[in-house]
Image (cartoon, helix red, strand yellow):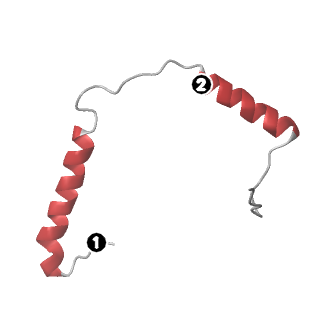
Amino acid sequence: MSVFLEGIPVLTGEAARRFQEEVERVNSMPVRELPEGFYDDIDECIERSRKYVREHEELGFRSV
């Protein structure tokens, strides 16, 4: 069974060729593992932001 979805762009010609070349280039790159603790700084920044919001909600500060 197939489903037809309107509005999905289809690459053809030169655009399709360039896209395929880029896919092949990315797929040929070596896979690298992230170093241990890679996301620690991001997690710390998010936690500081959450703490700031909690501390300032009583002053009318609201997060989105």
7 or 49, which lies in front?
Answer: 7
User: Crowdedness of circle 2 by 10 Å Cα count: few (<14), some, many (20+)?
Assistant: few
Q: Is residue 56 above or below residue 30?
A: below
Please identify the residue farthest to the right as the structure is shown: 13
Camera-near label (2 vs 1) is 2
Going 19% across and 47% down the picture, which residue do you hit?
Answer: 44
The circle on residue 2 is none
What is the x, y in percent for residue 37?
22, 32
Choose the circle earlier in sequence order: 2 or 1: 2
Disc 1 marks which amino acid? Answer: Ser
Alpha-carbon distance for marks 2 and 1?
Answer: 40 Å
Residue 1 is left or right of residue 57, and the answer is right
Q: Is residue 11 above or below residue 2?
A: above
Q: Which residue is mark 2?
A: 27
Query: Which quarter of the rendering shows the N terminus?
Result: bottom right
Secondary structure under the numbered disc 2 in the rendered image: helix
Q: Which residue is mark 1?
A: 63
Disc 2 marks which amino acid? Answer: Asn
Going 15% across and 72% down the picture, which residue do you hit?
Answer: 56
All told, the count of numbered labels is 2
Secondary structure under the numbered disc 1 in the rendered image: loop
User: Crowdedness of circle 1 by 10 Å Cα count: few (<14), some, many (20+)?
Assistant: few
Quadrant in the picture for residue 2: bottom right
Quadrant in the picture for residue 18: top right
60 or 35, which lies in front?
Answer: 35
Do the residues bearing badges 2 and 1 touch, measured as CB atoms within 8 Å? no
Going 11% across and 69% down the picture, which residue do you hit?
Answer: 55
What is the x, y in percent for residue 17?
80, 32
Residue 4 is left or right of residue 26, and the answer is right
What is the x, y in percent for residue 54?
14, 69
